[in-house]
Structures are given as structure tokens and as C-alpha cells.
Image (spheres, grey):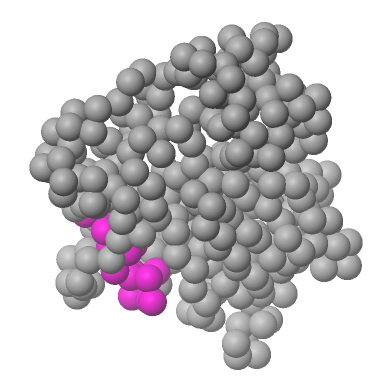
Amino acid sequence: MSTGGVDLLDELQSLIIRYAVGRRGRTQRLIDGVQISRADEPSEPTAGLMRPAVTVVASGVKRTLLNGVAYEYSAGQFLVSSLDLPVIGQALKASRDEPFAVVSLRLDPVDIAPLLLETPALPPQYGGLVVSDATPELLDPVVRLLRIADRPDDVRVLAPGIRREILWRLLTGEQGALVRQIGLADGMLAHISKAIRWIRRHHNEPVRVADLAELAGMSESTFHRHFRAATSMTPIQFQKQIRLQEARILLRTQATTAADVAYQVGYTSPAHFTREYHKAFGRTPGEDRTNFSSPVVAEGS
């Protein structure tokens, strides 16, 4: 990275640290659609739902697991998430001298769509998560957005233009083809998103791939292929991840038994639920209830 890029990263880290005072190790919303996170030590793996967003690392190293596949990104890199995805996130490298510091900006299709006419058509690219190096051209508007985050009038007047510039840099950069798909109202990701929203809202109900395919406006075979390409999971596997993450939240927030939680999220066998929970999180539901040290949060914005 050029000297200018290093300077921008240093400033980005400083801004995140300044805004995150008193909230170390936590993710917090800075302004609408913008979240920051800071940690002074490596974190435990934390389950959450990552929404369509771009996450830029200013310092430290982040690991995000999607269906067992690890995506690691460090200072000067960013991750694009294209759909609502059940992930496990972890700050791998962080210390008091060099804290983990990231900023995440929501990628809203309605904001991306108007820019598509200004960019050349690209071959479709599908994928739930991708990692790239952040160019100085991308880092510059991200830094400028954080500079004004504590000035409401500047945010009101200037932030929309800066957000547009960030989206433009993404659309014209290495991951432009994927970001473009997020903004297409009739694109494959939009159709898959309909199915994902149904699964999330009805995670405790039986799911039929044929019904999801009809909702997405695809044949069953086409839907299955595109769903797996976009999420790295089959629809049934995706529903299982959503159920397990919902169970984790219920275990922490409700005074009820693991068996009751299993039934609430759609399992008919508590023993089967316990086995799958342990496989996903490395702990039984009972152990997790006792040992929760990190909140279950939604990543992205």
C-alpha cells in the first residue's frame, strides 16, 4: 500500500478508537448504516447475522466463518457481504498497543441501484463473502465519513455524497461485479434474498425447497444451484444455521430449558438439537448458557 494509504489507515484507526472510548470489545452504531468495533485483545468466536455490508479493517485481524469456511482480513483489507448470512466472527489479533479496529457500512440496494447506469455491465459474480485490498481511493471517503460522524449537521448535508462516493469506489473496484448484483432489483441475489427472508421469519417451520424456488421465481434445480453459490450452503443447511443462532440468543435471554429452546426453534428432538449445537459452537446448550462471555450480535449493519 502507498504511503498515502498507510496514512489513511492510521487516521481511520485513530477515529475508530476515539469514537469507541468506553465501548471496547463492543460493536456500536456510529451513524445510520455505519458501525465501528474496537477490541484490545483477541475475542471469542461470536455468532451473528452478517447483513449486506462492506467492513474495512484499520488495524488487527478479523476472521469470519461462513459454513466452516474461514475468511481472514487484516489492516488495509475489506470484506463484502452480499446477503444476510449466519456467520461466526472473531478478532484474531488485537492488543492495547495495536487494537483491533474496524468500520462497517451497510450496502443498501436502493443506494446502489442509481449508480448502476453509470457503470459498465460486468459478468455476474456470485458469492456470500469476498475479501479484497482497500485502495487509497476507497479509504479516503471512508475516513472523511468518520471525520464528520460527531457533527450532526455535517452528517445530514455531507454524508449522502460521501456514501455515494464509497459505493462508486466499490462498484468500480475489484469487487464491482458482486456489489453490482446487490443493487439489481431483478438480479439473482435479490431473488435469493426473498428466500432468505422467508427462512429467517419462519425458521421454526418445515421448509420445502420447491416452495422457496417458487418464491424466488426459479426452477427448483436453478434455485438450489444459485442458493448454494451465493451462501455456500443448501437451503436446509442455511435454515439449520439460523435455528442454531436463534437458539443461542434464546438460551441467553430466556429462563427456560434447552429442550424448550429446541422446540421453539423447530427441532423435534432435543438430543438431535444438542448434538448439532455442540458441533456448531463447540459447547452443549447447557455449557453455553453458563459460559457465555461474548454477546450474540449482528455483524454488519
* 97 relative position to 192: left or right: right
At horizontal 60% and vertical 65% (from top left) the residue drawn is 72
Percent from the top left, x then y, of residue 169?
A: 40, 72
Label tally = 0
Q: Quadrant of the N terminus?
A: bottom right
* 137 relative position to 226: left or right: right
Q: Is residue 176 magenta?
A: yes
Q: In the orientation shown, which residue stands out farthest toward the right?
A: 96
- The quarter of the picture where residue 177 lies is bottom left
Region of the chain picked out in magenta, as a range:
170-185
Relative height, residue 234 to residue 147 (above, below): above
Nearer-the-camera pick, 247 or 16: 247
At horizontal 24% and vertical 27% (from top left) the residue drawn is 208
Percent from the top left, x then y, of residue 156?
A: 49, 48
Q: In the orientation shown, which residue stands out farthest toward the bottom?
A: 2
* 158 relative position to 14: left or right: left
Percent from the top left, x then y, of residue 158?
A: 48, 58
At horizontal 61% and vertical 75% (from top left) the residue drawn is 76
Q: Is residue 290 visible?
A: yes
Relative height, residue 177 to residue 67 (above, below): below
Percent from the top left, x then y, of residue 50?
A: 50, 45
Q: Is residue 216 magenta?
A: no
Q: Is residue 145 visible?
A: no
At horizontal 36% and vertical 18% (from top left) the residue drawn is 205
Relative height, residue 239 to residue 122 (above, below): above
Nearer-the-camera pick, 216 or 300: 216
Relative height, residue 268 to residue 182 (above, below): above
Secondary structure character of the magenta stretch overall: helix
